[in-house]
Image (spheres, coloured by chain):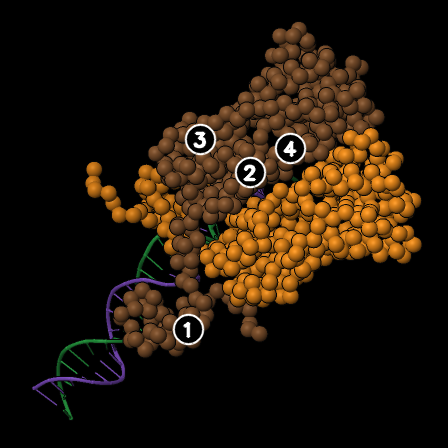
Chain colours: A orange, B brown, C purple, D green
Amino acid sequence: MYPPKKKPTIYEVADRAGVSIATISRVLNNPEKVNPETRSRVLAIIDELGFIPKAEARARALSGANRVGVITPFFTAPSFVQRLRGVASVLATSNYELIIYTVDSLNRLSSYLSSLPYTGNLDGLILMSLPIHVDEARRLIDHGIETVLIEFSHPGMHSIVIDDYEGGRMAARHLLEKGHQRIAFLGDKEPLDYSIHPPSMRLKGMRQVLEDAGVSLPDGYVRLISNTQEDATRAVHDLLGLPLPPTAIFASSDVQALTILRVARKLGIQVPGQLAVIGFDDIDAAEMADLTTIRQHLDESGRLAVEILMSHIIDPSRPPQQVKLPLILVERQTT
Amino acid sequence: MYPPKKKPTIYEVADRAGVSIATISRVLNNPEKVNPETRSRVLAIIDELGFIPKAEARARALSGANRVGVITPFFTAPSFVQRLRGVASVLATSNYELIIYTVDSLNRLSSYLSSLPYTGNLDGLILMSLPIHVDEARRLIDHGIETVLIEFSHPGMHSIVIDDYEGGRMAARHLLEKGHQRIAFLGDKEPLDYSIHPPSMRLKGMRQVLEDAGVSLPDGYVRLISNTQEDATRAVHDLLGLPLPPTAIFASSDVQALTILRVARKLGIQVPGQLAVIGFDDIDAAEMADLTTIRQHLDESGRLAVEILMSHIIDPSRPPQQVKLPLILVERQTT
DNA sequence: TCCTTACCTGTAAGCACTTTCAGTGTAACA
DNA sequence: TGTTACACTGAAAGTGCTTACAGGTAAGGA
């Protein structure tokens, strides 16, 4: 045997395999576009030669990095997962890489936001339900990283939002129509540094409708809690244990609504007979539980985010897109 | 406002500096060959434009990169999501990037498996409930990509599995103890090319226990379906519409179990009074629905996968690890 | 049977740099 | 003054790879 040869190039592989370099490239980058037979022959030769494409040459030829990142709150909530599912579904067809960054605090978020533009090598970025500051936005824009915000918006950036206020109104109107007069609200506590807090807007919408209808909303009927199971369970117990308990509860998320259902079941309270429950989001589990809810099309928001990203990566001169997704009341068995 | 900035190239820098691209290149690579004056002028412009040579950017993002990939079936099923959550949770604390590849067919899987070793620049890879062929495994190993398989195993690779057979036995024993004699099974149809099919193993376990107990399992009680809602719904209707319907059903996944619950509710069938239901997985929704189920710790499997990966990335000489995770019967309200 | 269509494949035109090579201007020397 | 030696510089020819395009072939449809 001869001493180890120099680094083989794609040309050598092509030679040996009796095909063109294009085919080699395709075997590596779009394997499905080449005949399985040819592919495995090429692969065999690649292995034999120990060929490794030079990353640097690759970068040169590649237009972008073909990477899009998603920053999401530590993803435990089904709603994030469903948005992610939408994102992944369209990305899967596009050979872009999907990189997930999970953040558990706003600190971590800003640390990502400050380093990603420089070291992330991303073509696009999606921020899920996360706020962004002006200077961070500026940096992203300067670096030509297309960014779409979901559930937030920022001047000059793409965004996909819903009308939370109207969502609250829809829920309240629905409950009112069903004849309820004692309606409670269950939502997440507002974190300190969020500029806009969707649950608060939903509460606001509900409050408005009730007011217009002359229905009072006592403070005791409004519960803002942290997003732990225990807190939710306690709040529901409190609410249902009130001297004059509500006959309906609007939960600002399906997860909370499901908790209500669960506690009610445990307490032997009939739903919707004694207690009506309406949620928000329409996560998968909502359908399984026959939960009436306000649907914001989560999957769609993810898909749309990627589509916006893609179209702007192709043509960055297009103006920022701000989309407001419609809300739909999905009436099932809990109201 | 500036015009939307693209990533600057060496050409732009050259333009602004009024020199040729060659000079820029030299400033970067052989600074001593360039007149100090020209050099500092060029450097200034490079800074101003925030120019980063592309190859370098790519290299930084890729080669020095700490990247672990996860290949998962097109993630629609909660169980995958929960495993992913486990993965993400531990990865978030390390500074590894998490790249998600979703596959909707085995074709796509093998296309990933053939290209990732070469162009993926991954340090580690996690395969979720996906089979791998010898030659693919070989390639991964040759390229030094630590790989852990979840729900499958392959000689020479790390794997995290559960005892599906025993899981089926546990479910059957539980139902038997509860006094059931007419027990049905609902599971996914076996795809053609999977070597091992967990639901089949669960069925096998259940069948064994029933046999030992002298309880018969008529063919009509065994439903293998595709994983669509409609199919599941129809199967449940069929089962419950039988002249002698089962008094208990073991579903090989929680999602299917929840469908059973839903159909039963619609049909006015009391659970667990008239029909007992036991699932498998213990996804989040199972708790919300008070579903009795066999828990395989999904989050834990994800966490563990990453931990195995990490420890072997640090010390590749360690032998492959094959872990069998314990199963727990979680009794709730549906049996 | 002929025409579509889909699938593979090679040709060739990039890509974003790097490097070679042939200058050019200038300063120093005779 | 002419000559030479340098230090710089730009044009252009690579570099190893990707990809748009188009030709060829085989399979399907009318």
- Chain bearing tag 3 is B
The amino acid type, in three-letter code, at marker 4 is Ile
- Chain bearing tag 1 is B
Point out the frontmost of discs 2 and 3: 2
- Give the image location of residue A154, x and y in percent: 64, 63
- Give the image location of residue B54, x and y in percent: 42, 60
Quadrant for residue B21, please give it: bottom left
Question: Tag 2, which secondary structure?
Answer: helix
- Give the image location of residue B12, x and y in percent: 44, 71
Q: Residues within 10 Å of mark 3 (few under 14, many from 20)?
A: many
Residue beneath disc 4: B283
Query: How far apart are the two marked residues, 3 and 4, measured between alpha carbons?
Result: 24 Å
Q: Which mark is residue B174?
A: none
Residue beneath disc 2: B86
Question: Tag 4, which secondary structure?
Answer: loop
Q: Is residue A101 above or below residue A194?
A: above
Q: Earlier in the sequence, mark 3 or mark 1?
A: 1
Q: Earlier in the sequence, mark 4 or mark 2?
A: 2
Q: Is residue B246 above or below residue A52?
A: above
The amino acid type, in three-letter code, at marker 1 is Ile
Q: Quadrant of the N terminus of chain B?
A: bottom right
Residue at 57% across, 19% down: B165
